Image: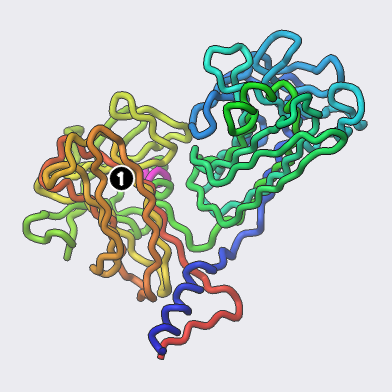
Amino acid sequence: MKTRKIEICLMLVALCGAFAGAADIVHSPYAAFVANYNGETFANGPQVDANGGVWSYGYRAAVASTSLNSFSQDKFTRASSALGGMNKQVDSSFIPYIAINPTATDVTDQGASPFRPVTPGNEFVVQPGNRSAGDANCGLPVIRFAAPRTGRYSVSAVCETLANSSEDDGVTSFHLLVNGSVVEERDLAHVSGSGTTYTFAKSGILLGFGETIELVVGPGMTALRNAISYSSDSSSVKIEIVEAEAEGLFSLGDDMAANILAGNSDNPFLEGRWTAGRYDRDTENPYPQSITSLLWGFSRDTYFVGYNEDGSTTKNLYCCVNTNDQVRTALSSQEMDPHEVIIMPSGARNADVRFVTPERGMWRITARVRNLQNSTTDDDTCGVRVFLLAEGACLADELLATPGTKVSREIEVVTSRLKSGAVVDLVLDSRGNASNDPVGVKLFVEKVIPPPGLMLVVR
């Protein structure tokens, strides 16, 4: 009975940890969209607003994707209403499009009832095309938010169908994505004389710098609906993102990039809190007792700099970061996110990134890892094994090795209560063959703060 009580308390602390600290920041796209529309300041490729660049707009053929195509026009106005925005085609159909009411009064989309009037400047009117590649009307509108900082985010998106459908099963589909993966999606019907409404609400989303939340609007999620209903899929979207920057949240990529951009070559960095290192796998395999710091001087590609074993540009064991604030290409063709880290172990030596806790308490460790080159087999000589350790104890053990495929994993663990100065390690083991083993890494270490009134009792 006592053991069960301890486990329940630990679970509550892990899952309900509060993210306290900085005041909430509300990110709303509408004022910037109207200002850019009236000032004709949208730029092609894809269109990004002036509100710190956190919102951007475009379209693509598939829902689950990271691509974003530019609309053909930066500014258009629907002839039958005062709605204005951007669209794909330069013709009378305007499909697909994202628009807003930039006037001071209510307007009615398509100029007649029973469509609900669109209020000025606080909602988007979105019209999807279809998913048929090569069709002039192909395209699913995308509203994208990119995190201006690493932190915890909440999203609220109120979606409502506006246009009446002439078809019995006329629908619009709405898809909420985080970093290109669908987290929730809904079909909403177009009903004569009234709209159908659904609200997406997600909180506590951990986003690294530049990672994304998207709302994608489509013509329905079945082939029949896709074929017949998209021309009557005008819908309303009200979206808002709230940022609650976490207290006690550390990002390997952010801290490494900030250290390098400040002109420092320190390793360890961030006051000695992070160390990029290595150890001999034969003598300490699989878990390290001590690690040797890598040396400054490595350059992998234009934007990717950091550390390796001898402080040169040779491609032995290394750890480097995309110091740029944009997605950049490394390893010839691999796109890397802002502040994403590339780590390459060697055959005889494991790569290790070590974090030293600045205070006592429980810590949530989140590692987003992906192999950047295809493994050829999944036997004991290929692929990368990923370990998460706290004070030398293994908390997670994952293998990145699927023949012919680049594998991604998100590993999240919560430690027991650690002392100040405890060590947390991310270890990459090439399993003796490092020829195809560079790994993209995003590593976050976050203090878990129990909610008020919750007390952990261990008997």
In the foreground, 244 or 421: 244
* Residue 267 horizontal/vertical position (percent): 28, 51
**Quadrant that contains the N terminus:** bottom left
Name which residue lies at 33% across and 64% down.
Answer: 356
* Residue 209 horizontal/vertical position (percent): 49, 44
**Quadrant that contains the C terminus:** bottom left
* Identity, as a three-letter code, of the amino acid under mark 1: Ser
Q: In this view, does 12 lie to the left or right of 354?
A: right
Residue 34 in view: yes
Magenta stretch, main secondary structure, is helix
Quadrant hosting residue 452 = bottom right
Q: Is residue 378 left or right of residue 271?
A: left
Q: Is residue 101 left or right of residue 158?
A: right
Name which residue lies at 91% across and 32% down.
Answer: 106
- Residue that sits furthest to the left in the current view: 282
Question: Is the image coloured rainbow, by chain, by secondary structure, or in one colour?
Answer: rainbow
130 up-or-down from 5: above or below: above
* Span shown in magenta: 256-260
